[in-house]
Image (cartoon, grey):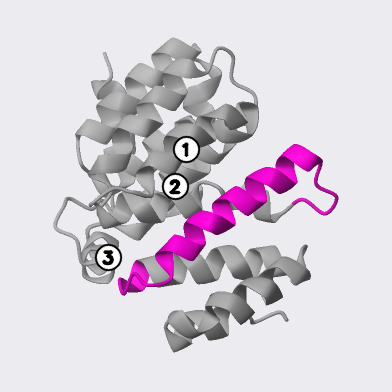
Amino acid sequence: MWQKYLDDLKSHADPVRAAEKARYHKVEREYLGIGNPVLGDLAKAWRQDLTVEDRVSLARALWNTDIHEARVTAAKLLTQARIRPDEAVWQLIESWVPDFNAWAIADHACMAGQRRLIADPDRLDKVEEWTRSDHMWTRRAALVITLPWTKQNNPKPDELAARDRILSWAKGYVHDREWFIQKAVAWWLRELSKHDRGRVVAFLESHGEQMKPFARREAGKYL
C-alpha cells in the first residue's frame, strides 16, 4: 500500500546530490539527494489525503526503509501542532529514538516530538528517562525535543518548573565529553538566553567551567 509513496519520493532522486549528502552526513545508509523543501512539500501533500492512523502507518514504513530522505519525510508527516488523537504518533516517535545515529534525522524527528510534548507536557516524565540512557543520541534528544521550553517570554509557573527541570538535566550533562552532548547543552542555553538571561547567567556561573570551551562560548553567544 505504501510503495507508491516511496516510489513518488524516489522519483525526485538526484544521484549527484545523493553522493554529496552521503559524504556530508558520514553515516552509512541510502541517500536520494532530495532537498528538504521538496520533502516538506511531499509530506504536506500526502497528509491531506491520509487519516492520522494512515499517516502513522506510512511514517513507520518510510522510517523502516532507513533511507535518509524517507526518514526525514516520516518525521515531517508527523510534524503538526494539532493531531487528534495523538498517542500513536507519540509512541511512534518514541520508538524511533533508539535508532538515532545522525543529527539531521534526529532533529527532524525531535521537531515532530516537540509538538507532542507541548500537547501533553506529562510526557516529559518519559523524556527524563532518556537522560539516563547509554545511547548518546537518546541523551541528546532529551534536550533537542524540549527546546520549546526555551522560547516562552512570559512562562506560566508550570512552564517555569519544566524549564528548571530541563536545566537540571543539562547540569547533569556538563561532565559528558561527547561533542554532540556539549553542543546540545550549548544550544539549549543559547536559545534560552534570548528569553531568560538570568537563568543562563546563573547556569554558566555555576557549571560553565565544566563545559568544553566551545560549548561555553556558544551558550553565552547572546549574553
The answer to whether the residue labelled 1 contacts the one labelled 2, judged by CB atoms less than 8 Å apart, is: yes
Q: Is most of the magenta stretch helix, strand or loop?
A: helix
Q: Which residue is mark 1?
A: 76
**Amino acid at dot 1:** Lys
Mark 2 crowdedness (10 Å alpha carbons): few <14, some 14-19, many ≥20:
many
Q: Residue 201, position in %: x, y?
A: 69, 76
Mark 3 crowdedness (10 Å alpha carbons): few <14, some 14-19, many ≥20:
some
Let me know if residue 166 is in the magenta part: yes
First to last magenta residue range:
152-180
Q: Residue 87, position in %: x, y?
A: 48, 17
Mark 1 crowdedness (10 Å alpha carbons): few <14, some 14-19, many ≥20:
many
Q: Which residue is mark 3?
A: 25
Q: Is residue 95 above or below residue 214?
A: above
Give the mark, 3 or 1, whose residue is nearer the N terminus. 3
Give the mark, 3 or 2, whose residue is nearer the N terminus. 3
Q: Which residue is mark 2?
A: 108
The answer to whether the residue labelled 3 contacts the one labelled 1, judged by CB atoms less than 8 Å apart, is: no
Which residue is nearer to you in this view: 175 or 82?
175
**Amino acid at dot 2:** His
